[in-house]
């Protein structure tokens, strides 16, 4: 022990290190208590941040997974009064510009548009699609539904269908096949493999085989067909009427939409503008996540400090004794800085390890499966975030050292007899 | 040449003949301020010379410990000056004060105040460890010899809780002497020991005083020990009175017959 001290510690601080190490080693239960307090503090912060930010991630995923982050469409001309319309050179005039039916607008050079968008920063996926309203019928009762025509593989990367399938397939969809929502299947009283008739808003009517049934658990969703089928169903020829874009950073959607609009002559709408209520609920969630993490950090900091302060106050007498033997104030403070550091480093290392283990164990709990064929999800959506572990460790070290040094400094300032009594 | 040597020798010889003053107080006052201000010392003027063994006696609460703590720079006077080796300690910075305590003064308290985490030898070496960070072999040998002198040669690696009260107090005496101080201040060093260990501890202190020439200022309630000192200072009503051993004996006799 002493030889180790001689090798590792410069002579200038050897007294301080020696006393600090001895305090910790012979402290027994006291040392164990303070180390446990630090560990517990770190565990709590790691646990809470991983839970709250995991929850945050799950909610974000849930809200933004099923929607495109940016939707590119032909600009819709809003109805406006004649007085606002710039007078045209001819004599032609109209009292109003009517809102056009959505199916009539199209993006004709969509491969070029998709390529342009794909090259922009932060863009993860681009899918040209055909969307429109249609009636699906089996026998006599037609049910209205939104139909999306897209390449199944691209579609899966924008708003996934395959992962929510409860029957059949989506990838490899044939031109006369359709994938429908479970709710719709129930309304129509059809099952996988049966045939249904789809009549589009433009009047085209085709017969499809149900190739797959999916369920997202979010009410009735769209019906999916291939891009080519969609084009013929809505009479778009070789054109599409929307391009869906998925981003890497979803909070950059507004800027991404602006970048797209600068390059292509179409309207790009970000999810934050299209679904402002999603954004606001995510923002509330984010703010409370930071708030809760912050409070847990402060609370565990105080808990650590409380335990440490008591243990240092118990050593006040010893501070007096050391001072009576000629120890300088700086030497005494250094003893307690080292002691605090020792407790903090060991405690936070133990805490970080145990905290991670607890989080990993929690992540193993699965939710009971409510839908057939669905992969069970984590009961606690925890995420281990190294950044917050580092923050927890830093905060623990800081509060430990402060809690060790402040009372020691006070004791070291007093007359030795006052603390020895 | 001869005259120069003579003139150099003169003050040295004079100093040898009359030991120099190591501790001196001038008009020392101490009041404890609180809800009620308690004046304890009312102007103390004392001089302690090198090599002296001084016993300080007085009633409980008469201010003996207060005086001793002020002499050792453990407490600050309300008024007046303390000179240690001719230096006014009120002029010292915090670090200089620490160095003074380390170099010049050794303390022995009623309780041994050894650090319980350290062994007997480590405790005795503590003032040197504080000073140097690492104790030289020569200093270690010196301290081990002192520990052997006080009969702790076989207890070097024992911790305070593994030794008897007398052993701990003897270790504390060695600790007070480890830095070869000029003054040892002892506050009832035998007060917490049975009379046999008390006498042993006292005898050791007296021996150390005679061998090394360290001045001892010892507070005691034990009148027999006071009789063994060179001088007796009585503190009464916040003032000091130098009393002869004869007077002291009479006082003791009158008190016991009362």
Image: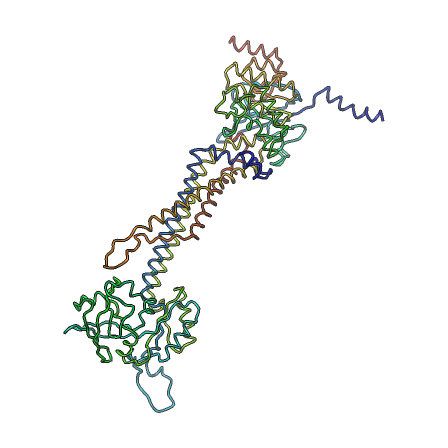
* In front of the other: A123 or B212: A123
Q: In this orientation, does residue A77 appear? A: no
* In front of the other: B128 or A293: B128
Instruction: Please state if A216 lies on the left or on the right of B234 as rendered.
Output: left
Instruction: Please state if B87 lies on the left or on the right of A157 as rendered.
Output: right
Instruction: Check the image and name the residue furthest to the left.
Output: A140
Quarter of the picture containing the N terminus of chain B is top right
Relative to B105, residue A222 above or below: below
Residue A324 place in picture, x, y as percent: 57, 30
Residue B4 place in picture, x, y as percent: 83, 27
Which of the 4 quarters of the picture holds residue A257? bottom left
Number of numbered labels in the structure image? 0
Which of the 4 quarters of the picture holds residue A64? bottom left
Instruction: Please state if A134 lies on the left or on the right of B111 as rendered.
Output: left
Relative to B238, residue A265 above or below: below
Instruction: Please state if A21 lies on the left or on the right of A212 as rendered.
Output: right
Residue B239 place in picture, x, y as percent: 59, 21
Which of the 4 quarters of the picture holds residue A54? bottom left
Instruction: Check the image and name the residue furthest to the bottom.
Output: A91
Q: In this orientation, does residue B137 appear? A: yes
Q: How is the image coloured?
A: rainbow
Residue B112 place in picture, x, y as percent: 52, 24
Instruction: Check the image and name the residue furthest to the top.
Output: B257
């Amino acid at each position: 022990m002493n030889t180790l001290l001689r090798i590792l510690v410069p002579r200038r601080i050897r007294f301080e290190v020696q006393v600090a190490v001895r305090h910790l080693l012979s402290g027994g239960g006291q040392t164990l208590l303070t180390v446990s307090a630090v560990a517990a503090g770190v565990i709590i912060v790691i646990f809470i941040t991983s839970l709250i930010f995991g929850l945050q991630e799950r909610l974000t995923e849930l809200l933004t997974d099923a929607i495109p982050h940016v939707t590119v469409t032909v600009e819709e001309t809003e109805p406006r009064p004649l007085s606002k319309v710039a007078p045209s050179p001819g004599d032609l005039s109209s009292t109003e510009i009517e809102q056009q039916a959505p199916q009539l607008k199209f993006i004709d050079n969509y491969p070029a548009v998709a390529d342009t968008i794909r090259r922009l920063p932060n863009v993860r996926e681009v899918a040209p699609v055909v969307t429109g309203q249609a009636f699906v019928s089996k026998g006599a009762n037609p049910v209205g539904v939104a139909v999306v025509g897209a390449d199944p593989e691209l579609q899966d990367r924008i708003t996934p269908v395959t992962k929510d399938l409860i029957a059949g397939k989506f990838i490899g969809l044939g031109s006369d096949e359709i994938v429908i929502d479970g709710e719709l299947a129930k309304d129509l009283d059809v099952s996988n493999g049966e045939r249904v008739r789809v009549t589009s808003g433009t009047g085209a009517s085709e017969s499809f085989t149900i190739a797959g049934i999916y369920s997202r658990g979010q009410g009735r969703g769209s019906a999916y067909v291939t891009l080519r089928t969609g084009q013929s169903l809505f009479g778009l020829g070789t054109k599409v009427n929307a391009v869906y874009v998925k981003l890497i950073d979803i909070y950059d959607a507004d800027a991404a939409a602006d970048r797209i609009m600068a390059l292509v002559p179409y309207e790009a709408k970000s999810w934050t503008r299209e679904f402002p209520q999603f954004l606001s609920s995510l923002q509330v969630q984010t703010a409370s996540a930071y708030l809760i993490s912050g409070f847990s950090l402060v609370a565990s900091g105080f808990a650590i400090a409380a335990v440490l302060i008591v243990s240092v106050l118990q050593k006040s007498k010893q501070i007096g004794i050391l001072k009576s033997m000629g120890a300088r104030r700086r030497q005494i403070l250094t003893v307690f800085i080292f002691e605090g550091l020792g407790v903090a480093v060991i405690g936070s290392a133990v805490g970080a390890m145990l905290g991670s283990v607890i989080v990993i164990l929690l992540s193993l709990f699965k939710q009971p499966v409510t839908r057939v064929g669905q992969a069970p999800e984590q009961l606690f959506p925890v995420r281990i975030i190294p950044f917050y572990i580092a923050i927890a460790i830093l905060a623990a070290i800081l509060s430990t050292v402060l809690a060790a040094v402040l009372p020691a400094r006070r004791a070291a300032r007093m007359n030795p007899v006052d603390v020895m009594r | 040449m001869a005259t120069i040597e003579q003139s150099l020798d003169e003050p040295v010889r004079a100093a040898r003949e009359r030991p120099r003053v190591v501790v001196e107080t001038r008009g020392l006052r101490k009041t404890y301020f609180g809800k009620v201000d308690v004046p304890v010392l009312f102007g103390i003027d004392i001089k302690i010379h090198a090599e002296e063994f001084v016993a300080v006696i007085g009633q409980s609460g008469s201010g003996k410990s207060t005086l001793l703590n002020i002499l050792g720079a453990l407490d600050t006077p309300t008024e007046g000056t303390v000179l240690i080796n001719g230096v006014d300690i009120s002029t010292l910075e915090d670090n200089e004060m620490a160095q003074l305590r380390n170099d010049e003064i050794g303390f022995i308290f009623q309780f041994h105040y050894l650090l319980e985490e350290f062994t007997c030898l480590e405790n005795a070496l503590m003032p040197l460890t504080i000073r140097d960070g690492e104790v030289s072999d020569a200093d270690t040998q010196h301290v081990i010899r002192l520990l052997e002198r006080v009969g702790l040669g076989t207890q070097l690696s024992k911790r305070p809780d593994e030794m008897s009260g007398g052993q701990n107090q003897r270790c504390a005496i060695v600790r007070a002497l480890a830095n070869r101080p000029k003054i040892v201040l002892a506050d009832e060093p035998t007060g917490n020991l049975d009379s046999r260990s008390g006498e042993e501890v006292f005898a050791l202190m007296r021996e150390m005083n005679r061998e090394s020439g360290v001045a001892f200022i010892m507070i005691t309630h034990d009148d027999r020990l006071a009789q063994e000192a060179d001088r007796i200072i009585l503190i009464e009503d916040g003032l000091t009175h130098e009393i002869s051993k004869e007077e002291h004996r009479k006082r003791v006799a009158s008190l016991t017959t009362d």
